[in-house]
Each structure stands twice: as C-alpha cells, then as structure tokens.
Image (spheres, helix red, strand yellow):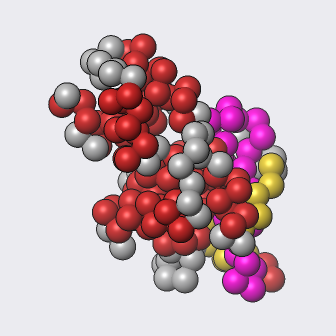
Amino acid sequence: MTIRRAENKAMELLESLNIEELPIPVSKIAQACGVKTKPYDLGEDISGVLVINNGKGTIGYSPMESSVRQRFTIAHELGHYLLHSKSSKEDLFIDKGFKVLFRDYSSSTGEIRNEKEANAFAAALLMPKNLLISKIEELDLDLTDESAIKELAKMFNVSTISMSFRISNLGLNLY
C-alpha cells in the first residue's frame, strides 16, 4: 500500500457512496462500510482503537478530544480497517482473538508506514481534493492568508493544522 493508493481508496469510497456534502459524514461512511463507531474512554494517550472480531470492525474514539480530532481518528481507524486489517504485521492481539490497532501519539506523527497511509486516507476522506479545490476556487481564497485556512477548516470540520497539511501535501499553496 502506498500513500497514493490510500488516497485513491478514500476517493473511490466517497464516489461509491456518492458523497459530496460538507462536512464529510465520517461516522455514516464507517457505518456504510460495516464498521461501528463508539465513544470510549481510552485513557489519556490513546485517541482511538480499531477492534476487529470475526471480520467485523468497531472503532472506539476518545470523547474527551475535540470533535475535529474525533472525526480524524474515526477516519484514520477506518483507513486501517480498509487498508491494513487483513495484512498488518503491526497489529496488537489481545484476549479472545481480537485484533487491535491503536491510534496514539506515535501514530499521529506518522512515523510508521501504515500510520502514514491511514493518515493519508483520513485526510483524503475528510478533505477530498476535488471538493477542496472547488471550495478554494468558488470562494477565491488566498491560501497565504491564515483566515482562509481557518475558513476551509471550519467548512470541512477539521483542524486548521490538518487543513494546512492537506493543502501543503496537495501542493495547493502554490496558487
């Protein structure tokens, strides 16, 4: 799996579900993929967890974090489910044959390849390139202006940091 394939997987998923609304309904998308989402107190250092039992996924996310962080965590864990759940060598296994993938500080930095792919999937799912470019053009936004980034982040219901990374990774800040 590569970053490009992870992004393509997110785009294909949005197209297959005919989703073009903002903000992207990430919990509904997870549900459409057969994955449940549940708020769960995971402790201070854990943002989310993907539990796979008998091929069925459940994403637990911390209700203590901001809603934009919860959305990114759900999208990230959904990325793991769709991209890595059958082949990941970095899974943790706990009692009763559960396969678990945690989202914590090290995963949020994207240091591990699977984490980078899940982050790319999440970014592409929550901030689809076509919708992002469309909004930038429609609103004639100057991406060198911090208020434009904040406006886009609010529209897509993501953090300004996530939006900044997405714009940079897509090379859109060259406008």
- Which quadrant is home to the N terminus? bottom left
On screen, residue 65 versus residue 22, left or right, reads right
Q: x, y (%) of residue 59?
A: 71, 60
The residue under the point 45% across, 36% down is 162
On screen, residue 35 versus residue 122, left or right, reads right
Q: Above or below — where is 168 with respect to 62?
A: above
Q: x, y (%) of residue 52?
A: 70, 75
On screen, residue 117 versus residue 143, left or right, reads right
Is residue 57 found inside the magenta-colored segment of the image? yes
Q: x, y (%) of residue 101?
A: 61, 66
Front residue of this view, candidates 95 and 86 = 86
Is residue 151 found inside the magenta-colored segment of the image? no
Res 8 → quadrant: bottom left
Front residue of this view, candidates 88 and 118 = 118
Q: Above or below — where is 147 with respect to 39?
A: above
- Which quadrant is home to the C terminus? top left
On screen, residue 31 versus residue 127, left or right, reads right
Res 105 → quadrant: top right
Looking at the image, the residue that sits furthest to the left is 174
Q: x, y (%) of residue 41?
A: 81, 47
Front residue of this view, candidates 65 and 46 = 65
The residue under the point 29% across, 43% down is 169
The residue under the point 26% across, 35% down is 172
- The residues colored magenta run 45-70
Q: Is residue 158 visible?
A: no
Q: How many marks?
A: 0
Front residue of this view, candidates 119 and 134 = 134
